[in-house]
Image: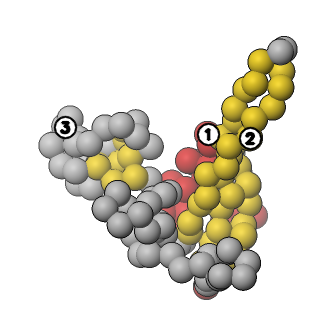
Amino acid sequence: MKKCTYCGAEYPDEAVTCSIDQEPLKAVGVVAETEEAGVPMDSTGNPIQFNEETGLPVGFERFVVYDSYSAVKLFWQMEREGIVFWAEKLKEEREADNETKAKDQFTVFVRKEDLERALKMCHRGEGHV
């Protein structure tokens, strides 16, 4: 999902500009990679560094795994609260009725300094969907 940088209207991922005010759109929450550099970014657009041994993002704690629908709601709430996060998209495939079905999930990492606020947000019920 993307949001207009000016009015906040929401659009699908494939949209580029806002149909209301023609302003550019920004990915909500997850910015998987910048197209030019291929560098993973956090929710504020800052590059993520990874621990070479563990492969985990430096300065972040693993927070939760959500399906894509619930994750988008969580991303929106975290952005509203000013909580910096990064999410890794996972694809889970499973057999059902002789078909392979894919289900997207996100592992959400929260910046260590924001972890307590993120936990309080979820405890208040704002992060649960």
Q: Residues within 10 Å of mark 1 (few under 14, many from 20)?
A: few
Mark 3–mark 1 distance (CA, rounded to whole Å):
25 Å
Residue 18's place in the image compared with 74, above or below, is: above
Q: Amino acid at mark 1?
A: Tyr
Please identify, in this view, whether the residue under mark 3 or under mark 1 is nearer the observer: 1
Q: Say which residue label 2 marks.
A: 92
Residue for point 73% across, 78% down = 54
Q: Say which residue label 3 marks.
A: 20
Can you give x and y, in whole percent of width and height, for residue 29 in the image? 49, 58
Q: Under tag 3, what secondary structure?
A: loop
Please identify, in this view, whether the residue under mark 3 or under mark 2 is nearer the observer: 2
Q: Residues within 10 Å of mark 3 (few under 14, many from 20)?
A: few
Q: Nearer the viewer, residue 14 or 11?
A: 14
Taking 40 as reference, is 112 left or right?
A: right
Q: Residues within 10 Å of mark 2 (few under 14, many from 20)?
A: few
Mark 2–mark 1 distance (CA, rounded to whole Å):
15 Å
Q: Nearer the viewer, residue 26 or 73?
A: 26
Q: Amino acid at mark 2?
A: Glu
The N terminus, quarter of image: top left
Q: Under tag 1, what secondary structure?
A: helix
Query: Mark 3 and 1 residues: CB-CB less than 8 Å, in contact?
Result: no
For residue 69, the mark is 1
Residue for point 43% across, 68% down = 39
Can you give x and y, in whole percent of width and height, for residue 75 in the image? 55, 56
Mark 3–mark 2 distance (CA, rounded to whole Å):
36 Å
Q: Earlier in the sequence, mark 3 or mark 1?
A: 3
Q: Earlier in the sequence, mark 2 or mark 1?
A: 1
Taking 11 as reference, is 107 left or right?
A: right
